[in-house]
Image: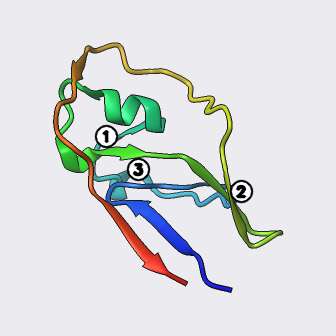
Amino acid sequence: MSFVLCYFLQEVFKSDVHVAIPLDQVLGLCCVLSVKDYFRSKPDGFADKDVYVCESRYSTKARAFKKIKVLFFAVWYNGQFIFQSSVMITICSAV
């Protein structure tokens, strides 16, 4: 059986893995958006390389990806969102 996996260039996945990183190794701020918000707007004050999209979670126990139906993000960003007019590129690969 063959199927196609598609990923956004700036995609991250929610996971049950927790890793502690010392503060002196943190490079800066980033913004993670739902797919709907990622296509609709861009947070003001963030470079394109610092804006990510999250639409799936990865379970290490099941070793599988699953789409997130409702994305619950704590919103700490108090800035403005700018209307997005550019098209996001996806990367697809046959498995």
Label 2 amino acid? Answer: Asp
Q: Where's residue 56, x and y in %?
A: 60, 52
Rendering quarter of residue 42: top left
Q: Secondary structure at mark 3?
A: helix
Q: Where's residue 36, x and y in %?
A: 45, 31
Judge from the rendering whether residue 4 lies leftward or rightward of residue 17; answer left or right. left
Please count the marks in the image: 3
Which part of the image, by quadrant, shows the C terminus? bottom right
Judge from the rendering whether residue 74 lies leftward or rightward of residue 63; answer left or right. left
Q: Secondary structure at mark 2?
A: loop
Q: Where's residue 55, x and y in %?
A: 54, 46
Label 1 amino acid? Answer: Leu
The residues bearing labels 1 and 2 have C-alpha atoms spaced at a distance of 21 Å
Q: In the figure, 40 relative to 5: above or below?
A: above
Rendering quarter of residue 19: bottom right
- Give the residue at x 82% y 69%: 62
Closer to the camera: disc 3 or disc 2? 2
Outermost residue to the right: 61
Rendering quarter of residue 46: top left
Q: In the figure, 1 relative to 37: above or below?
A: below
Report the disc number at residue 47.
none
Which part of the image, by quadrant, shows the N terminus? bottom right
Pointer 1 or 2: first along the chain: 2
- Give the residue at x 42% y 45%: 53
- Residue designated by label 3: 23
Label 3 amino acid? Answer: Leu
- Residue designated by label 1: 29
The residues bearing labels 3 and 2 have C-alpha atoms spaced at a distance of 21 Å
Within 10 Å of the Cα at label 2, are there few (<14), some (14-19), or many (20+) other Cα atoms?
Answer: few
The residues bearing labels 3 and 1 have C-alpha atoms spaced at a distance of 12 Å
Q: Secondary structure at mark 1?
A: loop
Report the disc number at residue 16.
2
